[in-house]
Amino acid sequence: MKGAWRAADIRAAEKALMAKLPEGTLMQRAAAGLARRCAGLLHDRFGGVYGRRVLVLAGSGDNGGDAMYAGAALARRGADVRVIRLSDRIHGASYKALVAAGGRPAPAPHGHLDLVVDGIVGIGGRGALRERAAAVVAEAVRARAEDGGAPVVVAVDVPSGVEVDTGDVPDPAAAVRADVTVTFGALKPAHVVGAAAVHSGLVDLVDIGLAGYLVTRPAVEVPDHSDIAGWWPSHASTDDKYTRGVVGLATGSDGYPGAALLSVAGALAGPTGYVRYAGTAQESVRERFPSVVTTDSVGAAGRAQAWVCGCGLGTDERAVGELRAVLATPVPVILDADALTLIADGSMAQPLRERRAATVITPHDREFARIAGAEPGADRVEAALRLAAQMNAVVLLKGDRTVVAAPDGSAFANPTGSAALATAGTGDVLAGLLGSLLAGGLPAPRAAVAAAYVHGLAGRLAAEKGPTTAVDVAAELREAVTLATR
Ligand SMILES: NC(=O)C1=CN([C@@H]2O[C@H](COP(=O)(O)OP(=O)(O)OC[C@H]3O[C@@H](n4cnc5c(N)ncnc54)[C@H](O)[C@@H]3O)[C@@H](O)[C@H]2O)[C@@H](O)CC1
Ligand SMILES: [K+]
């Protein structure tokens, strides 16, 4: 698990570390790491640094300092480095070092460009790029590299123009879109949540010695394969179909039988040995998945260790009754889609409050708005945490980087998101998989994080093969589980 910290926490850690080091050490470490990464990128794409055309965009703060020191290092290796000063006041020592190494000031981007280094603002940045900076960035990225392609864009610490602490991008046209972001000391929320995570491109973390100095809890955490593999319920040789957990699905309706099938497909890819389906799509479920035990209602179904409720369930009287039945069970429950619509008017507040087992809700932004009264807004992590605390439920807020927030204040961002998942029915698959993980005994926050992770991988696998539907995502789940858990 990697943590991401907000700017104030990073600054406090840097201050404590800096007090123990000669002045300028941290910037030198940052710049050296940045120069190394830039040289590596030039080498990979153009075969070397010598003669490559590099444009450094320098703003007023230390972010510009990092960029110009790195520019100096590249100039010493023979790159043709220009710098555009985007403020009257720029970091003096690094500018002198750049000029001494052969770098030259430029008024505007000119000619071909192989590498653009964004040192406009770092963790001191607020809001969108100012007009001139935005215009210069737009012009620079329109330039051509020597090989005819677009220049490589490297953001220093964070892409300029994004909100570091929230991952919001107030104006996408006035924010850098990086191929690679070279960041220092620790990740920041902008690298892992919201549109800023997309603007960050690949994130490359340079160690500047900060680790022991970050004493606060991270704002958000990011899982990797080893977390998922470590959490995934393993099967003991003594297990039978019941000990691995039974997941129940109260999904689908006459109007939406497909949602039942997709949620069942998701559940079957999880670790449980037994899937119960309760609803009107019994027949199609049995036909398509003979291993699933079906009934027409939650009341008629046997016991389960977790219930999934809502995907395609509808919002009629029958749906209300099924939701009530699920909420009354003493086991973890996932509320998705129509179940979220049904709880939005507050009529289920009491059964929700009375629950002792975990409740997980899986809203997209509009569903979130129905429940919370407003869309998540700029700070998706804070918004999800607020709703989690208010409802005493784990909130899985869907998005390109899905956020999972728990009532205990912990928050996670899923790194495997994919645009391929923005298609009808993928949420049903996710809910089923999540149900299986809960029934398999994972604590709710981990089950939500692991489900989002594997579901994202499945989306990526499906997208590699062509245009993606929810059926394709479900079909890739098995391979995604194997990938994530080995
Ligand atoms: N503090 C440290 O110990 C270290 C800092 N480092 C670098 O220093 C950076 C932070 O430096 P600073 O604190 O000087 O802050 P920045 O370099 O992020 O710049 C902030 C300045 O930019 C201006 N600004 C803010 N928003 C703007 C906008 N939208 N458009 C134009 N100008 C804007 C403000 O006037 C502010 O003074 C880090 O991101 C990192 O790159 C690294 O050298 C590692 C060590
Ligand atoms: K930057």
Image (cartoon, rainbow, N blue to C red):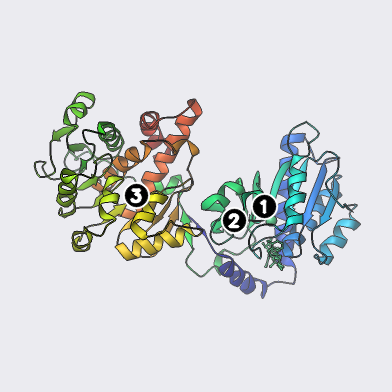
Mark 1 or mark 3, which is nearer the start of the sequence?
Answer: 1
Ligand 1 shows up in the quarter that is bottom right
The relative height of residue 417 versus residue 171 in the rendered view (above or below) is above
Q: Position of residue 388 (x, y in %)?
A: 35, 61
Return the residue nearer the eye: 375 or 44.
375
Left or right of residue 60, residue 190 in this image: left
Mark 3: amino acid: Thr
The residue singled out by tag 3 in the image is 362
Name which quarter of the figure residue 58 lies in.
Answer: bottom right
Marks 2/1: CA distance? 8 Å
Q: Residue at x 40, y 40 (%)?
A: 454
For the residues labelled 2 and 1, say whether their Cβ atoms are less than 8 Å apart.
yes
Per the image, the residue denoted by label 2 is 170
- Please rate how many residues cluster around mark 1, counting C-alpha atoms within 10 Å: few if below 14, some from 14 to 19, many from 20: many
Which one is closest to the eye, mark 2 or mark 3? Answer: 2
Q: Position of residue 389 (x, y in %)?
A: 34, 65
Q: Give amino acid for label 2.
A: Pro
- Distance (Cα) linking label 3 and label 1: 32 Å
Tell me if mark 3 has few (under 14), some (14-19) or many (20+) residues whose alpha carbon lies within 10 angstroms of its own.
many
Whole-number angstrom distance, CA of label 2 to CA of label 3? 25 Å
Q: Is residue 170 left or right of residue 97?
A: left
